[in-house]
Image (cartoon, rainbow, N blue to C red):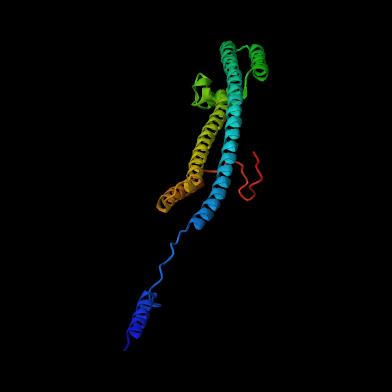
């Protein structure tokens, strides 16, 4: 074999050794490419923005209900105070009326002891007229209890005094109920404000993902943003919607 033939054979061998083999396994592409991360960030930014707007709206509804309930509570408390004053006046009036009736009953006993029928009839007439014009149904009920139980004072009837203030106490309970509802609305509104803060933090993290040149850093920040987003969604789902909010129609709100 000549020298030229040897050189040609060696050259062909070198070329064959430099050519990649078809059996060599090609390098796998990474699952999260830069383009995919940008797409995910864009989608998450849209979702987070919508959720943040939703939380802000619901929080404002809670704030409106809080204001309404506090105002109604104050008005109802004022009404309860006025009713209490009226009830107190009725109680004092019945107390004085009972003192007068007691004097009439003492006179009646004296007339019965004397056997003066005309005087007895006159005093009975005064008593009946006085009852119709001056005493309340509560005192009438107490006097009936007094006669049935052989007592000397209708105000000894159990719960007699409380009966005068029942309406005022009911109004006061309604005022306290409205106050508690207002406090709950305030707490719920604060919770939705916290949700808005979480979404804002999520938006911030998503916004800075692209500033990192290293792919692992981008992925790390993206994962943290997703964790905050999921936490915010779960937390928001556990906060009750405003009272009267139409859950079947999110564009309807009736108080």
Q: Residue at x 56, y 45 (%)?
A: 49
Q: Position of residue 81 (x, y in %)?
A: 58, 20
Question: In the displayed structure, would residue 181 be above or below residue 103?
Answer: below
- 197 and 131: which one is in front? 197
**Foreground of the two, 70 or 208:** 208
Q: In terms of image quadrants, where is residue 131?
A: top right
Whether residue 42 is situated above or below residue 75 in the rendered picture: below
Residue 202 position within the rendered picture, expressed as x and y whole percent measured from the top left: 49, 44
Q: Is residue 99 above or below residue 40?
A: above
User: Residue 213: horizontal and vertical position, in percent?
Assistant: 44, 49
- The answer to which of 97 and 218 lies nearer the viewer is 218
The answer to whether any part of residue 113 appears in the image is no
Q: From where the camera sits, is residue 36 visible?
A: yes
Q: Name the residue rendered at 61%, 31% in the picture.
A: 68
Q: Residue at (59%, 36%) from the top-left corner? A: 60
Q: Quadrant of the N terminus?
A: bottom left
The number of discs equals 0
Image quadrant where residue 163 sits: top right
Q: Residue 147 sits in which quadrant?
A: top right
Q: Decide: is 255 above or below 10.
A: above
Q: Is residue 28 left or right of residue 152?
A: left
Residue 243 picture location, percent across and down:
59, 40
Q: Could you tell me which quadrant the C terminus lies in?
A: top right
Q: Which residue is nearer to you in this view: 116 or 168?
A: 168
């Amino acid at each position: 074999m000549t020298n030229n033939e040897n050189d040609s054979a060696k050259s062909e061998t070198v070329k064959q050794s430099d050519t990649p083999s078809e059996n060599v396994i090609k390098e796998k592409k990474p699952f999260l490419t830069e383009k995919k991360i940008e797409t995910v960030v864009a989608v998450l930014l849209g979702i987070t923005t919508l959720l943040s707007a939703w939380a802000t709206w619901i929080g404002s509804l809670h704030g409106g209900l809080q204001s309404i309930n506090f105002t109604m509570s104050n008005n109802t408390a004022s009404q309860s105070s006025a009713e209490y004053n009226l009830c107190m006046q009725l109680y004092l009036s019945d107390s004085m009326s009972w003192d007068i009736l007691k004097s009439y009953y003492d006179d009646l006993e004296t007339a019965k002891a004397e056997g003066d029928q005309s005087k007895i009839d006159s005093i009975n007439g005064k008593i009946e007229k006085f009852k119709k014009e001056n005493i309340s149904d509560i005192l009438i009920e107490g006097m009936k209890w007094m006669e049935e139980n052989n007592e000397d004072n209708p105000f000894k009837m159990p719960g007699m005094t409380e009966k005068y203030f029942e309406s005022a106490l009911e109004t006061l309970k309604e005022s306290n109920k409205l106050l508690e509802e207002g406090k709950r609305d305030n707490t719920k509104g604060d919770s939705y404000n916290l949700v808005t803060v979480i979404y804002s933090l999520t938006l911030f993290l998503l916004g800075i993902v692209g500033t990192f040149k290293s792919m692992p850093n981008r992925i790390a920040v993206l994962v943290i943003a997703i964790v905050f987003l999921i936490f915010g969604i779960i937390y928001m789902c556990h906060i009750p919607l405003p009272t009267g909010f139409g859950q079947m129609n999110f564009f309807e709100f009736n108080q």
